[in-house]
Image: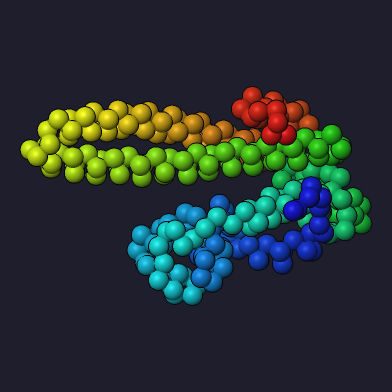
């Protein structure tokens, strides 16, 4: 289990390479792992690939969607790296960032300014421990919403599969109407009831996903534009409205 700690920035890049999607070449987003060769890819990347190809992009083994399973370790590493980057200067891996450069939109240490003269003419703000704690918590809570959104997307896919199965059964029931009218009518009623119930659950799932996607987009924009402790406190208040207290 990966604990809430940090690693040196110099160690992050090699680690990031291990969880890089071979298709988009970015850090993996919502990871999937091939059960045949263990290659890591993004969920959206492999979904688009399998729509056109029926073989693994790495080992060329014949595959279908179910051959790419969730890799929770990769997702945990991504979260771990994001938090570690907040605690390391981008230029001096052993230094803790003490200043936020508003001009470059990056965290830097005193060495960058005092010794190397970098960012000296830029606008910057000092970072206190409360600010770092809140921004780390905000990233953690945002990760919780991302996970919740993904779970709902998985539930939606399962509901759609059940609905399609019910529709197929419904069609089969209609074909046998002439041979067993009374039984068929009962089955049709039960199927319709189940269909309506799952359609309602599907709509609820869609509404929750839309809400979470909207929250994620808003919070990501706010985090990118945040320059002060008050900004982070405002983000924290927004996140806490949408997340159970046990998630923190």
Quadrant housing the C terminus = top right
Please say whether residue 68 is visible from this viewpoint. yes
Could you say which quadrant of the image residue 78 lies in?
bottom right
As drawn, 209 above or below 65 = above
As drawn, 186 above or below 8 = above
From this viewpoint, which residue is outermost toward the left? 178
Residue at (35%, 63%) from the top-left corner? Answer: 52
Rendering coords of residue 140 (x, y %): 70, 40
Residue at (79%, 59%) from the top-left corner? Answer: 9
Please say whether residue 226 is visible from this viewpoint. no
Q: Nearer the viewer, residue 248 or 12?
A: 248
Rendering coords of residue 164 (x, y %): 30, 43
Q: Nearer the viewer, residue 168 or 202?
A: 168
Please state if 244 lies on the left or on the right of 110 as rendered. Answer: left
Rendering coords of residue 239 (x, y %): 65, 30
Q: Nearer the viewer, residue 86 or 174?
A: 174
Residue at (44%, 75%) from the top-left corner? Answer: 60
Residue at (18%, 40%) from the top-left corner? Answer: 173
Could you say which quadrant of the image residue 93 lies in?
bottom right
As drawn, 196 above or below 89 = above
């Amino acid at each position: 289990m990966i604990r809430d700690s940090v690693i040196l920035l110099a160690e992050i890049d090699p680690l990031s390479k291990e969880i890089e999607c071979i298709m988009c070449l970015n850090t993996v987003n919502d990871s999937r792992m091939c059960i045949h060769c263990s290659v890591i890819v993004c969920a959206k990347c492999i979904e688009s690939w399998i729509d056109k190809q029926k073989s693994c992009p790495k080992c060329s083994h014949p595959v279908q969607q179910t051959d790419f399973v969730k890799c929770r370790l990769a997702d945990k590493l991504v979260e771990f790296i994001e938090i570690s980057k907040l605690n390391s200067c981008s230029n001096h891996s052993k230094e803790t960032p003490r200043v936020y450069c508003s001009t470059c939109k990056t965290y830097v240490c005193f060495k960058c300014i005092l010794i190397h003269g970098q960012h000296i003419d830029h606008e910057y703000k000092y970072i206190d421990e409360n600010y770092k704690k809140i921004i780390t918590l905000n990233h953690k809570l945002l990760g919780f919403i991302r996970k919740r959104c993904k779970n709902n997307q998985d539930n939606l896919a399962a509901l759609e599969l059940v609905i399609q199965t019910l529709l197929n059964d419904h069609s089969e029931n209609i074909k046998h109407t002439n041979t067993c009218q009374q039984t068929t009518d009962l089955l049709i009623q039960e199927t319709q009831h189940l269909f309506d119930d799952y359609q309602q659950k599907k709509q609820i799932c869609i509404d929750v996903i839309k809400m979470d996607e909207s929250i994620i987009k808003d919070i990501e924009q706010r985090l990118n534009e945040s320059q002060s402790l008050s900004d982070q406190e405002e983000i924290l208040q927004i996140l806490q409205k949408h997340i159970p207290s046990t998630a923190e």
